[in-house]
Amino acid sequence: MRSLIAAFLVLLLSPSIAFGWGRDGHAVISEIAHRELSPEVLDRVTEILGGRHMAEVGAWADEVRRQPAYRWSAPLHYSNIPPGEPAFVFERHSPPEGCAVAAIKRFSQELVDPELTDDQRREALKFLIHFVGDIHQPLHAGFAHDRGGNDIRVELLGRPFNLHAVWDSGLMRAAEVGPWPEYADRLHARITDHQRGAWSNLNPEVWTTESYQLAVTFAYAIPDDGKLDEEYVQRNIAIVDARLSIAGVRLAQLLNELLGEGDELDAAVDGEAAVPVGG
Ligand code: ADE
Ligand code: ZN
Ligand code: ZN
C-alpha cells in the first residue's frame, strides 16, 4: 500500500508530463547554452535573471501555461505543419493565436527592447530559453490532428504512454541517461567545433523544419501495434541527444547575438562560426 501511495505521489508530482521537453530536457539545454555563452553575455543573462542560473528557469513556461494569467501562452509551445508540406513557412503556417516560431521572434525582440521594464525583459528571456528548447523536440513540430503525438497511445518497453510524452521524457528515462547534470556534461563534452559551425543557424523556421522531418522519419515511425521496444529506444535516444545538444548551442548563439557586442556574433548569423578567418 505504501508503495502504491508513493507511486501515486511520484505521478502527481512529476512535472510537465506531455509538456515541453520534461524538466530535465530543458535543464540540459540550458546547461549546455550556459557553457557556450560568451563571458560578457553570461554576465548579462545572469543579471537579467536576477542571479538565477538558466537551468533553474528553463521549465518555467510549462509551470505557468495552465494559469489563467498565462493561458495565452499555451499555443506557443509548438509549431504544427500540415501533412504533405515540405517545410515550415511562417506566413503560411503560423496561426493567429501564435506558435513557437512566432514566440521566438516576439521574445527575441522583447529581450532587447529598451522600452520594456526589467521584469518584462526577464520574462521574455525565460520564454525564449524555453521555446528554443521546445521547438527542437521533433514532436513539437508535428501534426495538429494528433496534437504532436499526444493523441497516439503506445507502449514504451511495456508501459502505457502517449507518443508525445515518449519524446518529451520517456526515451531519456528508458535509455537511463542518468541525472541531468551528468547527462549535460556528457553531451557537452562530445560537441566539436565542426558541429558548432554546422549547427549555427538563427532561423527558427529552419529549426522547425528539421524537427518536423525528424518527427516524420523517426518519431511517427512506430509499429502498428504501438509497442516501442529497446530497438526504438536505442535508435531514437541518439536523435534526442543530438536535438538537446543542438538546441543548447543555438540558444547560446542566439543570446550571444542578441545581447553581445563582439564580432564573434556576426559569424553565428552567417553560419561560419567554425571557419577561421583567413584560414
Ligand atoms: N498541441 C497541438 N499540437 C501540439 C504539439 N505539436 N505539441 C504539443 N502540444 C500540441
Ligand atoms: Zn513547453
Ligand atoms: Zn512536449
Image: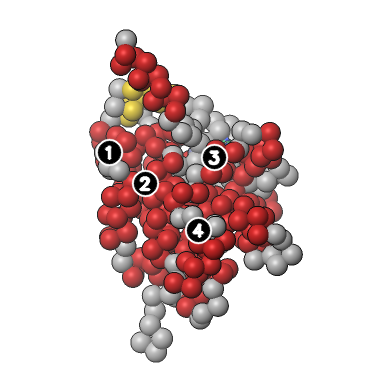
CB of mark 4 near ligand 2 (< 8 Å) = no
Q: Quadrant of the C terminus?
A: bottom left
The CA distance from mark 4 to mark 3 is: 21 Å
**Residue 240's mark?**
2
Query: Nearer the N terminus, badge 1 or badge 2?
Result: 1
The three-letter code of the residue at mark 4 reads Gly
The CA distance from mark 1 to mark 4 is: 33 Å
The three-letter code of the residue at mark 2 reads Val
Which of the two marks, 2 or 3, is nearer to us in this view? 3
The CA distance from mark 1 to mark 2 is: 11 Å
The three-letter code of the residue at mark 3 reads Asp
Q: Is residue 266 left or right of residue 229?
A: right
Q: Residue 191, relative to residue 225: is it above or below? A: below
The CA distance from mark 1 to mark 3 is: 24 Å
Q: Quadrant of the N terminus?
A: top left
**Residue 175's mark?**
1
Most foreground residue, 64 or 93? 64
Residue 84, position as x, y percentages in the image: 55, 43
Quarter of the image for residue 205 reads: bottom right
